[in-house]
Image: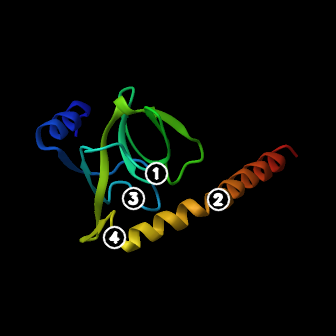
Amino acid sequence: MTESGIERVLARDGALVYKTRGRSMEPMLRQDRDLVLIRVPDARLRKYDVSLYRRGGDYVLHRVVAVEPGAYRVRGDNTYCVETVPDSAVLGVLRGFRRKGRTVRVDSLGYRCYVRVWQGIYPLRAMYVRLRRLVRRKGGAK
């Protein structure tokens, strides 16, 4: 779907279903395999919501890790840097996704448990990635 098509569909229908692209939300969302349901938010997003926002000419689907006045701090489930996104850039919020014929709703117990565990182990995942990069750099310096 074209960039302008995303905003047009959301404005017209209040919702959008599309196939994901990119790897920043793995392992939850898999590139070119999962369909996501995005809705126009009816209130400010909350911590752990997955926001669809515009960054320049790109559309990004990342998780809210902190709510600030007029903005959100977001990060992909498979990324290790946090970005600040103003309220005005947020177009939608994930309400569910479909994988292999099965629908996962963001208000389901399984999804909520996944989010808590995945976000809870973030410090360990980040430390592992930093150590792996350090070892690779030192190994390449020989």
Q: Describe the element under mark 4 as helix, strand or loop.
A: loop
Name the amino acid, label 1.
Lys
Question: Disc 3 or 1, which lies upstream in sequence?
Answer: 3
For this orientation, the residue located farthest to the top is: 56
Q: Describe the element under mark 3 as helix, strand or loop.
A: loop
**Position of residue 44 measured from the top left corner of the image (x, y, whole percent):** 35, 42
Q: Which residue is mark 4?
A: 108
Point out the frontmost of discs 2 and 1.
1
Q: Which residue is mark 3?
A: 30
Name the amino acid, label 2.
Arg
Q: Is residue 110 left or right of residue 16?
A: right
**Position of residue 27 measured from the top left corner of the image (x, y, whole percent):** 47, 62
* Mark number displayed over residue 125: 2
Point out the frontmost of discs 3 and 4.
4
Q: Which residue is mark 1?
A: 47
Quadrant of the rendered image containing residue 31: bottom left
**Crowding at label 4, few (<14), some or many (≥20) Cα neighbours within 10 Å?**
few
Q: Is residue 102 placed above or below 58 in the rendered structure?
A: below
Question: Disc 2 or 4, which lies upstream in sequence?
Answer: 4
**Crowding at label 2, few (<14), some or many (≥20) Cα neighbours within 10 Å?**
some
Point out the frontmost of discs 3 and 1.
1
Q: Describe the element under mark 2 as helix, strand or loop.
A: helix
Q: Residue at x 59, y 63 (%)?
A: 120
**Crowding at label 1, few (<14), some or many (≥20) Cα neighbours within 10 Å?**
some
**Position of residue 49 measured from the top left corner of the image (x, y, whole percent):** 40, 52
For this orientation, the residue located farthest to the right is: 142
Point out the frontmost of discs 2 and 3.
2
Name the amino acid, label 4.
Ser
In space, the residues marked 2 and 1 are separated at their CA atoms by 19 Å
Q: Residue at x 79, y 53 (%)?
A: 135
Name the amino acid, label 3.
Arg
> Which of these two is toward me, 30 or 40?
40
